[in-house]
Image (cartoon, rainbow, N blue to C red):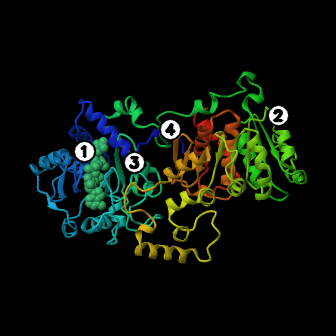
């Protein structure tokens, strides 16, 4: 698969509202015009996928998402579609009311109830315009049941999933977090899955996080005329930029980021190998060197000029094999490491993979005192949790998975996932004797007290919030791993990399390779946030390029092809 790397800006729901308000306050555009543009974008997306007019059922909720639904209905009807529109007996805001009035001149509005929904004839397309960014609490009563029906409660999951078009999001999804309000965080069978979601101006975090990518289906980002406010005045509305690195969107490429690092301290050395930096990968005791070797190989492949592997002297014998390009130097203690790091040509360090917690704890002080750009992963994170954050600085990149994050930031983890006793087992946890039973227990407890797993008031605390809070507290870049990787810097800048499409990347040693790629990019002079975000992307691209059957050893060898695909 050849994809060009791209990125797109992401707005939280509050930022989206602020942007819309700024545009309307300028007097140059009205809310009604925005809603017309939104409705037109959804109608266009439907007509693009169902070129022949057919039957459509449009479900309109109480607010502006519902207003978009009435606008879609009117446009489809004018294009020759047969429409069935269900809505609420309420008085929405002025723009949605105008759309409702316009539709009412064209056709009837049935009351949006379960019975009415079930009674109607089958449709080619179902448009979910019940809730969008305004969802503030879990849907209840009839609306909750209709949403559950769309999710396949009546056994119709497969039948709706291919025909469901979501306006902004499948209803019930919190667009700031990607979780469902008042529902088990790990998801639920009743969550609607759309074939297509059309969102406006910019994606929201919930399109990329947690259940979002699974429930939204194909994501279409429609320009509705807000761009000029986002690009000019919008800066003031969004002090901390959030960017999603999202392969299908080729907005810009990251070629410049990789091969013209702006801050390469050694650039003046021209084409010399030291101009590409020197990465030091700390390795562990005899018999545990594989993880660090994977990282070292990845650092070489991503273009670090030199890579040195540093195991204890007694373990050097384990590293006699390839790659021959790799240098090896024994390091037994913190003094030896400090002496090695006195060489200014070493531009980045990675410590943790296969290191052993004791050795990582003993060497961590020397790594941090050297003030070098560094990646702290695996055992180094466990050691850090025990030792505290003193000495961390803004050139450190912490790469925890969920379990390591919980050890480092237990309060943030609890805010995100609920008390440890109530969250699903995950990577890094002590093995649960019976994971299936454990999940069943969790679901039962969540049914009894849904607020135990997610809050009942939106927006929910998100993985993005957790990573940002963690980065601010640690004073370092935090890369929180998962199918949705969030990377945050202490100043609030953040990146999301969504990789739900490559489940085969969850394989032993993949994290060690990621640490090596980031160390290689840091060694080349990339700033820590960019090194971590670009690293996460390249790592995922390598897995995409290889496909299923991947083992971590395959990843570094894919990197040259990934770079070639990007035109490098
Ligand atoms: N912000 C923008 O720039 C634009 C927004 N548009 C549409 O407007 C939507 C947001 O509109 P709204 O803010 O009106 O919100 P929604 O239409 O998403 O929410 C509906 C209303 O229901 C109420 N509500 C929330 N949770 C509820 C619950 N559980 N049960 C019952 N009622 C509940 C809220 O008070 C809200 O006003 C977007 O998703 C999008 O579809 C578009 O028209 C284009 C421009
Ligand atoms: K919706």
Image mark count? 4
Q: In the image, which is nearer the foreground, mark 1 or mark 2?
A: 2
Q: Secondary structure at mark 2?
A: loop
Residue of label 2: 343
> Furthest-left residue in view?
105
Quarter of the rendered structure image containing ligand 2 = bottom left
- Whether disc 1's CB lies below 8 Å from ligand 1 is answered yes
Looking at the figure, which quarter contains the C terminus?
Answer: top right
Q: Is 560 above or below relative to 132?
A: above
Crowding around mark 2 (Cα neighbors within 10 Å: few <14, some 14 to 19, many 20+) is few
Between the residue at mark 3 and the residue at mark 4, the CA separation in whole angstroms equals 15 Å
Tag shown at residue 219: 3
Crowding around mark 4 (Cα neighbors within 10 Å: few <14, some 14 to 19, many 20+) is some
Q: Secondary structure at mark 4?
A: loop
Between the residue at mark 2 and the residue at mark 4, the CA separation in whole angstroms equals 37 Å
Sequence-wise, the earlier of marks 1 and 2 is 1
Q: Position of residue 318 (x, y in %)?
A: 86, 54
Instruction: Out of 186 and 49, give the one closest to the viewer.
Output: 186
Between the residue at mark 4 and the residue at mark 1, the CA separation in whole angstroms equals 27 Å
Q: Secondary structure at mark 1?
A: helix
Q: Tell me whether circle 3 and circle 4 mark residues in contact (CB < 8 Å).
A: no
Residue of label 1: 39
Tag shown at residue 6: 4
Q: Is 363 above or below relative to 563?
A: below
Instruction: Out of 561 and 259, give the one closest to the viewer.
Output: 259
């Amino acid at each position: 698969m050849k994809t060009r790397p791209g990125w797109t800006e992401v707005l939280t729901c509050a930022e989206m509202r602020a942007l819309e308000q700024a545009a309307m306050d300028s007097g140059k555009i009205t809310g009604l015009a925005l809603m017309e543009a939104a409705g037109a974008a959804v109608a266009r997306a439907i007509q693009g996928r169902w070129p022949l007019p057919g039957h459509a059922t449009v479900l309109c909720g109480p607010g502006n998402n519902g207003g978009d639904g009435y606008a879609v209905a009117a446009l489809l009807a004018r294009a020759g579609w047969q429409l069935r529109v269900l809505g609420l007996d309420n008085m929405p805001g002025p723009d949605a009311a105008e759309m409702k009035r316009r539709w009412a001149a064209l056709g009837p509005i049935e009351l949006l109830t379960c019975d009415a929904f079930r009674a109607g004839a089958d449709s080619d397309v179902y448009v979910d315009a019940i809730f969008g960014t305004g969802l503030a609490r879990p849907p209840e009563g009839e609306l909750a049941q209709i949403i559950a029906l769309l999710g396949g409660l009546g056994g119709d999951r497969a039948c709706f999933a291919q025909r469901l078009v979501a306006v902004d999001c499948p209803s019930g999804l919190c667009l700031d977090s990607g979780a469902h309000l008042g529902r088990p965080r790990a998801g639920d069978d009743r969550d609607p899955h759309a074939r297509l979601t059309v969102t406006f101006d910019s994606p929201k975090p919930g399109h990329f996080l947690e259940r979002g990518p699974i429930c939204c289906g194909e994501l279409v980002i429609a320009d509705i005329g807000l761009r000029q406010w986002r690009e000019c005045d919008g800066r003031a509305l969004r002090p901390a930029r959030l960017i999603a690195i999202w392969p299908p969107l080729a907005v810009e490429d990251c070629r410049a980021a990789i091969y013209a690092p702006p801050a390469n301290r050694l650039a003046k050395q021209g084409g010399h190998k030291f101009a590409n930096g020197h990465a030091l990968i700390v390795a562990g005791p005899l018999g545990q060197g594989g993880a660090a070797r994977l990282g070292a190989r990845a650092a070489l492949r991503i273009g670090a000029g030199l890579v040195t592997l540093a195991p204890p002297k007694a373990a050097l014998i384990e590293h006699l094999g390839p790659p021959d390009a790799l240098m090896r130097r024994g390091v037994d203690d913190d003094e030896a490491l400090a002496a090695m790091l006195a060489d200014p040509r070493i531009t980045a360090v990675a410590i943790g993979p296969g290191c052993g917690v004791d050795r990582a704890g003993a060497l961590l002080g020397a790594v941090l005192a050297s003030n070098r750009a560094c990646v702290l992963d695996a055992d180094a994170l466990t050691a850090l949790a025990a030792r505290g954050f003193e000495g961390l600085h803004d050139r450190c990149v912490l790469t925890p998975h969920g379990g390591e994050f919980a050890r480092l930031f237990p309060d943030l983890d609890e805010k995100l996932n609920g008390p440890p006793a109530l969250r699903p087992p995950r990577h890094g946890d002590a093995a649960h004797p019976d994971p299936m039973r454990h999940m069943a227990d969790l679901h039962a407890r969540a049914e009894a007290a849904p607020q135990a797993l997610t809050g009942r008031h939106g927006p929910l605390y998100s993985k993005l919030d957790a990573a940002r809070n963690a980065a601010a507290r640690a004073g370092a870049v935090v890369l929180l791993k998962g199918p949705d990787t969030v990377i945050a810097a202490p100043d609030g800048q953040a990146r999301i990399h969504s990789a739900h499409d490559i489940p085969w990347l969850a394989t032993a040693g993949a994290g060690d390779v990621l640490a090596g790629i980031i160390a290689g990019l840091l060694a080349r002079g990339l700033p820590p946030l960019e090194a971590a975000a670009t690293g996460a992307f390249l790592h995922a691209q390598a897995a995409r390029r290889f496909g299923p059957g991947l083992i971590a050893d395959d990843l570094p060898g894919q990197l040259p092809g990934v770079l070639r695909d990007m035109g490098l």
